[in-house]
Amino acid sequence: MAEGTPIRVLVVDDEFSIVESLREILLWEGYEVDTAPNGRLALEAVARSRPSLILLDVMMPVMDGPTMLRALRANADTADIPVVLMSAAPLRSTPDALGYQAALRKPFEALALLKTIRALVA
C-alpha cells in the first residue's frame, strides 16, 4: 500500500462476538474496518468501498465464505483483493484451488492475525 493510504479491512463473519473482537484489535492497530455478517452483504460492502484485505469466515448463512470468494475471483475488479480465510474446522481446499492467500484456524491469537495481515498488505 502507498504510504499514508489507510488500510481498510473487511471482516466477514456471522458471529457478532468474533466480529467485534477483530474490529477492536484492528482499530487499535490503526486499520479502517468494515464488517458484514455474510458473503452477500460483504459483496455489497466491497462494491461500496474496496477493502485492502478481507478476513472471511468459511461457514455463514445466506452466502458462505467459499461462495463469496469464488464471486470475488470471478470479477476483474475484485479478483486481486487478498483474502484470509478463518475457520474452526480444517479447510478442505487449498489456496490455489479456492484463491485465498492465507488461512487462520479459529481460535487464533491476535499476534498471528496481525502478522498475517502485515505480510499481505505490506
Image: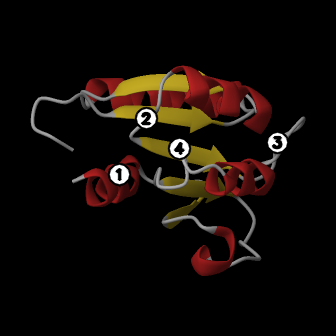
Q: Is residue 89 visible?
A: yes
Write down the residue under mark 2.
Answer: 9
Give the alpha-carbon distance from disc 4 to disc 3, as whole Å.
Answer: 24 Å
Closer to the chain start, of discs 1 and 4, is 4
Q: Is residue 3 left or right of residue 5?
A: left
Of badges 2 and 3, the one in the foreground is 2
Closer to the chain start, of discs 2 and 3, is 2
The local crowd at label 4, few if under 14, some if 14 to 19, many if 20 or more residues have their Cα within 10 Å, is: few
Of badges 4 and 3, the one in the foreground is 4
Residue at x 68% of width, y 33% of height: 43
Q: Amino acid at mark 3?
A: Met
Helix or strand or loop: what does disc 1 sit on?
Answer: helix
Which label belongs to residue 60? 3
Q: Are marks 4 and 2 in contact (CB under 8 Å)?
A: no
Which label belongs to residue 117? 1
Residue at x 21% of width, y 54% of height: 122
Give the alpha-carbon distance from disc 4 to disc 2, as whole Å.
Answer: 17 Å
Closer to the chain start, of discs 1 and 3, is 3
Q: Amino acid at mark 4?
A: Asp
Q: Amino acid at mark 1?
A: Ile
